[in-house]
Amino acid sequence: MSKKKIRIQVIIECTEHKNSGLYGTSRYITTKNKKNNPERLELKKFNPILNRKTLHKEIK
C-alpha cells in the first residue's frame, strides 16, 4: 500500500480585493504540510490588480 500524502495543494485568495468590488480575483496555488499546519493558511502575496502586497487566505 502507498503512504498517505501529508503535503497537499491549496488555493489562497486575496481578501482585500474581494471586498474592494473591483473586477477579477488574485489567487495563488501553493502547498502546505497538513501535519505541521492543520489550520488555514494566511500569507502576504503580491496582488497585481491592486499593485501591492495583500493578505491572501486559504479557500475551501
Image (spheres, helix red, strand yellow):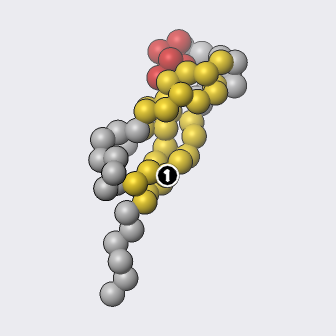
Please state the total of marks drawn on the protein image.
Answer: 1
Residue 14 visible, this orientation: no
Q: Is residue 24 left or right of residue 32?
A: right
Q: Position of residue 7 (x, y in %)?
A: 43, 60
- Relative to the observer, which residue lies in front, 43 or 51? 43
Amino acid carrying label 1: it is Thr
Residue 10 visible, this orientation: yes
Q: Is residue 60 left or right of residue 50?
A: left
- Residue drawn at (34%, 47%) of the image: 37
- Residue drawn at (37%, 82%) of the image: 2
Question: On the image, numbered disc 1 is attached to which residue?
Answer: 31
Residue 21 placement: quadrant: top right
Query: Circle 1: is it few (<14), some (14-19), or many (20+) Cα within 10 Å?
Result: few
- Residue drawn at (55%, 21%) of the image: 54
Please tell me whether residue 5 is drawn above or below residue 59 in the rendered image: below
Quarter of the picture holding the N terminus: bottom left
Please tell me whether residue 25 is drawn above or below residue 29 in the rendered image: above
Question: Could you say whether the residue bearing mark 1 is in a helix, strand or loop?
Answer: strand
- Relative to the observer, which residue lies in front, 33 or 21? 33
